[in-house]
Image (cartoon, rainbow, N blue to C red):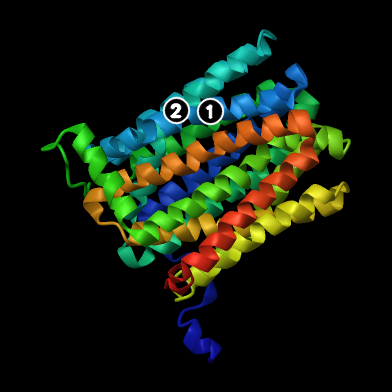
């Protein structure tokens, strides 16, 4: 096919199409700043926990504490997102997250922070996320046209992964030079950018309320839609596999940096940043190809390749090879997560979007802590490399089953 026919617009206009919408531009830059701070805190917090406890299992406990509220409350958060102004809800949740970051910073500066403090604050952050995530995901559809939705979701991944590239690398440097308290402080300040952006955004709220039915009935309606739709149901299963067996790998990064690579906080930051670089490249590729009719093939390719890269990562103990493989893992997983997200939203009616995104967020954020506690416990008793190999094997089995039994996924456009 002639390249000019394939790309009817200049490449940069195709890749960044959603940025022509003013509201989305405000959101994009506000989130870009905030998520760099968020990744600084995630990276510094993990290494601080490992310094305090020297326990891979406790890293898993912190991951579990931050994620268990997602399992309990995110679907209810989806109902709330369908019943109220998503913009207002996001301002509230982002403000709560800012407050929690400052509390952790104060405890750290006063040198009274203890592991149980971090567990409790991680639970509080997870609770805020349970209401933030479905509102944030469904809010995208209020800022862009339907034809730019896939592009906007892909650019959201570039926001997330740009933060993942910059945040951990900066956190490693600041942690080593000034201590973790400054990482948490910078994260708290970074929330000002996204809160200011949300205040400036002007949207006509397009939420079809479900107040005429009970909360439980509204919740059931969203869950039933997911499980009665074979494509959405299968994509949710793939997302769970990626999160349990792939994303949870991040839980072990502090221990991996010290025990396998014989490094320090800077090594930990480099590993996170390498994954972010791979994910960012993948997200930009999705943004460019988002309107093409190959999304199902890309989802399948990503689901089969990410466990292979994880298995190879488990066998490598050189920093250069580990960084390359983390980038490849990030590249592959983003194809599954973001294209599945876009496909699910395109198949969901507006009046159910918040609740379906609530189910998506429950699976996404709830599966990671389950994977974290599993991989953390396995690493404690069997070793880090063995735990990662077992996770990769389980993910490959799930992906192979979907490839063989649900060929319709590969044909999705």
Quick one: label 2, few (<14), some, or many (20+) residues within 10 Å?
many
Residue named by callout 2:
69
Q: Residue at x 71, y 52 (%)?
A: 310
Q: Residue at x 74, y 33 (%)?
A: 379
Figure quadrant of residue 177: top right
**How far across and how far down the image is residue 71, in percent?**
43, 33
Q: Do the residues under discs 2 and 1 have CB atoms within 8 angstroms?
A: yes
Q: Quadrant of residue 84?
A: top left
Q: Nearer the viewer, residue 269 or 400?
A: 400
Q: Nearer the viewer, residue 134 or 34?
A: 134
- Please state if 352 lies on the left or on the right of 378 as rendered: left
To which residue does mark 1 refer? Answer: 66
Vertical placement of 63 versus 396: above or below?
above
Q: Is residue 316 visible?
A: yes
Percent position of residue 72, x then y: 40, 29
Looking at the rendering, in which quadrant would you find the C terminus? bottom left
Q: Is residue 237 left or right of residue 89?
A: right
Q: Helix or strand or loop: what does disc 2 sit on?
A: helix
Name above or below for residue 301 compared with residue 307: below
The residues bearing labels 2 and 1 have C-alpha atoms spaced at a distance of 7 Å
| Image spot of residue 21 (x, y percent) | 36, 59
Residue depicted at x 59% and y 30%: 63
Vertical placement of 152 versus 374: above or below?
Answer: below
């Amino acid at each position: 096919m002639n390249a000019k026919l394939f790309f009817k617009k200049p490449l940069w206009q195709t890749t960044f199409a959603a940025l022509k919408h003013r509201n989305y531009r405000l959101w994009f830059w506000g989130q870009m700043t905030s998520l760099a701070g968020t990744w600084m805190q995630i990276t510094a917090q993990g290494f601080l926990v490992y310094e305090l406890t020297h326990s891979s299992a406790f890293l898993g406990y912190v991951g579990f504490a931050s994620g268990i509220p997602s399992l309990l409350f995110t679907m209810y958060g989806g109902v709330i997102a369908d019943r109220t102004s998503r913009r207002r809800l996001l301002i509230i949740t982002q403000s709560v997250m800012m407050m929690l970051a400052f509390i952790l910073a104060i405890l750290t500066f006063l040198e009274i922070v203890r592991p149980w403090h971090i567990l409790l604050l991680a639970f509080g952050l997870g609770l805020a996320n349970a209401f933030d995530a479905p509102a944030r995901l469904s809010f995208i559809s209020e800022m862009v046209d339907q034809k730019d939705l896939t592009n906007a979701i892909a650019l959201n991944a570039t926001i997330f992964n740009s933060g993942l590239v910059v945040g951990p690398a900066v956190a490693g440097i600041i942690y080593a030079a000034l201590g973790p308290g400054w990482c948490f402080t910078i994260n708290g300040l970074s929330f000002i950018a996204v809160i200011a952006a949300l205040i400036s955004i002007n949207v006509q709220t397009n939420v079809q309320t479900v107040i005429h039915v009970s909360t439980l009935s509204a919740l059931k309606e969203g869950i039933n839609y997911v499980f009665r739709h074979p494509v959405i149901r299968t994509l949710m299963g793939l997302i769970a596999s990626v999160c349990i067996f792939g994303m949870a790998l991040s839980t072990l990064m502090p221990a991996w940096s010290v025990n396998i690579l014989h490094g320090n906080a800077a090594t930990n930051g480099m590993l996170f940043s390498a994954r972010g670089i791979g994910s960012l490249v993948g997200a930009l590729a999705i943004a460019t190809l988002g309107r093409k009719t190959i999304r199902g093939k890309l989802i399948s390719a990503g689901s089969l390749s990410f466990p292979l890269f994880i298995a190879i990562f488990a066998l490598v103990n050189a920093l250069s090879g580990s960084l390359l493989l983390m980038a490849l893992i990030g590249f592959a997983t983003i194809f599954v997560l973001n294209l599945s997200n876009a496909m699910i939203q395109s198949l969901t009616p507006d009046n159910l979007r918040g609740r379906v995104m609530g189910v998506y967020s429950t699976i996404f954020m709830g599966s990671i802590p389950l994977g974290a506690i599993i991989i953390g416990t396995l690493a404690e008793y069997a070793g880090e490399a063995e735990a990662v190999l077992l996770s990769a094997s389980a993910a490959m089995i799930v992906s192979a089953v979907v490839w063989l039994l649900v060929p319709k996924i590969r044909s999705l456009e």
